[in-house]
Image (cartoon, rainbow, N blue to C red):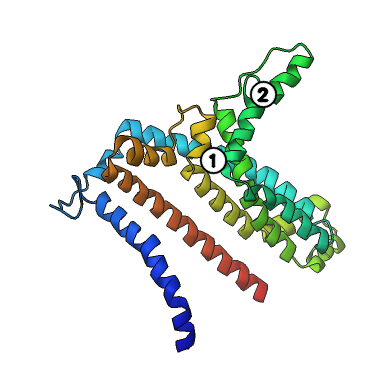
Amino acid sequence: MKHYTKLIRPYLIWSILIIAVPFILIILYAFTTGGNVLVNIRFTLRNFKQIGEPIYLAVLRKSFVLGFFSVLICLVLGYMLAYMITRFRDSVQDLLILAVTIPMWINTLLRTYAWISILSDNGIINRFLGLFGLDYVSFMYTDFAVVIGLVSDILPFMVIPIHTSIRKIDPSLIEASYDLGASKAQTFLHVIFKMSVPGVINGVMMTFLLSISTFVIPKLLGGGQYMLIGNLIENQFVSVGNWNFGSAISVILTVIIMIGLTLMKRFDKEEKRDDDR
């Protein structure tokens, strides 16, 4: 046991330096005012009250609306894709899941620039429309462009947990449903979909948290006019220099993420309990 403790000691030290210390500083900045939190510390809740101003509430509202539509599209596409993948044999399923995850290996910035080349006024889509004499369509700097960028970025995080849940379903349960006279639609709704709900919830939570916290995609595809939670935090730290307010928003986002992770963990436990039965 002592041997294992020595092995993980460097990891613990590294984790404290790059995770714990910065997080403690963010909390200090969030609950203090002024410049250096280590000098003349004055605790206040003003940073959190500032979030209640109409301009920042609009940012939160916009983030949740775009996040909702992105998650809804990911849920529909992701469930269909995950379900189709489970129709193949196991070896093929592994290859198809690998194909789904391959885009995640590419930097988000590069993928976003690829969408710019597709959606811009002189992009691939408008050039294709021009071949038929059609007027170009302005996709860039719209909700559509931002949602498309978000969906392409977070879709794998919806597919993988749903596929895992569907793959765990005992085939004999589906066969029993057919033997009892259930139709394909009834079997899907009452057996397959019902037993894959934990995977759906995990996928929804993961994609929603990622969609509201990103800042690269709204900044590039939204042309700088889309201010979501991630963009607001970046703006406060980099451009405005108001680290206290930026830290307060970060703390709120962290709380939202922790609640989401707690719910995911809860449903994972329920799924494992069902598997044990």
Q: Position of residue 61 (x, y in %)?
A: 43, 36
| Numbered label tally | 2
Q: Residues within 10 Å of mark 2 (few under 14, many from 20)?
A: some
Residue 35 to residue 180: above or below: above
Q: Nearer the viewer, residue 37 or 245?
A: 37
Residue 277 in sight: no
- Residue 123, label in figure: 2
The residue at 58%/56% (across/down) is 202
The residue at 61%/19% (across/down) is 138
Q: Nearer the viewer, residue 2 or 83?
A: 2
Q: Nearer the viewer, residue 80 or 276?
A: 80
- Residue 143, label in figure: none
Tag 1 secondary structure:
helix
- Residue 68, label in figure: 1
Residue 9 lies in what quarter of the image? bottom left
Residue 170 lies in what quarter of the image? bottom right
Residue 221 to residue 205: above or below: above
Q: Amino acid at mark 1?
A: Phe
